Image (cartoon, rainbow, N blue to C red):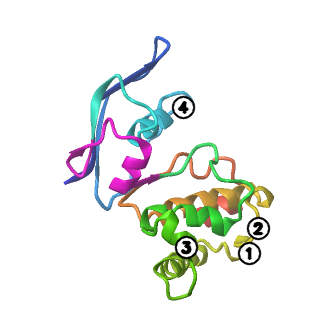
Amino acid sequence: MAILRIENLSISFGGIKALHDVSFEVEKGMIYSIIGPNGAGKTTIFNCISGIYRPDCGRIFFKEEEITHLKPHQVAQKGIARTFQNIELFSHMTTMDNLMLGRHLHMKTGVWRGATFLSRRSRAAQEEIANRRKVEEIIDFLELQSARNQFVSNLPYGTRKLVELGRALALEPELILLDEPSAGMNLEEKADMM
């Protein structure tokens, strides 16, 4: 059964067709690649799936539920995460902070309850500890220990790409869209990514 289904997707920008009648399916547990030259519409497909762009026509289904007109945060709530062709991180935050942002859907404590973070036993404190543990697992998995407390702006390009991947993994998605995950990396960084 397909976890993602694209049906007859089309979108134009100023009279230029970026996508025309695109259809495909992605089976759960499989790895797929969209290949094409620059300007072929690969990123546009991801932007439509993730709710950044609204297609002119066509439909997008995730786990048999139509998500064509959902906003990006609603798509994330459904279980789809992504990385971007151009890195989209908060450069003046640490690696840890950027990864914690990927946990936002798993944080249930509201602003007011979080503001009364008075003891280590509070719900907010327990939630913070649990989410930090998950982020530490991702840091270990991606071998980002040396970057944990560094500002992202000070990290090499390849490491920033890994941080962005880590933030997507922190969401614990059922589907992850990787937009040119190794673009701009040197051979060693690409080998580490794989």
Q: Which amino acid does label 2 sit on?
A: Gln
Residues under numbered marks 4 and 1 in contact, where contact means CB atoms less than 8 Å apart: no
Question: Which residue has dot 4 on it?
Answer: 37
Q: Judge left or right: residue 65 versus residue 96.
A: left
Question: Which residue has dot 2 on it?
Answer: 150
Residue at 45 percent across and 69 percent down: it is 109
Question: Which residue has dot 3 on it?
Answer: 138
Residues under numbered marks 4 and 3 in contact, where contact means CB atoms less than 8 Å apart: no
Q: Judge left or right: residue 91 versus residue 69.
A: right
The local crowd at label 3, few if under 14, some if 14 to 19, many if 20 or more residues have their Cα within 10 Å, is many
Question: Which residue has dot 1 on it?
Answer: 146
Query: Is residue 167 depicted above or below 12 in this figure?
Result: below
Is residue 142 covered in magenta?
no
Q: What residue type is labelled 3?
A: Ile
Secondary structure under tag 1 reads helix
* Sooner in the amino-acid sequence: mark 2 or mark 4: 4
The local crowd at label 1, few if under 14, some if 14 to 19, many if 20 or more residues have their Cα within 10 Å, is few
Magenta stretch: give its range. Answer: 61-81
The local crowd at label 2, few if under 14, some if 14 to 19, many if 20 or more residues have their Cα within 10 Å, is some
Residue at 59 percent across and 71 percent down: it is 142
Please state which of the two labelled residues, at mark 3 or mark 2, is closer to the viewer: 2
Q: What residue type is labelled 4?
A: Pro
* Sooner in the amino-acid sequence: mark 4 or mark 3: 4
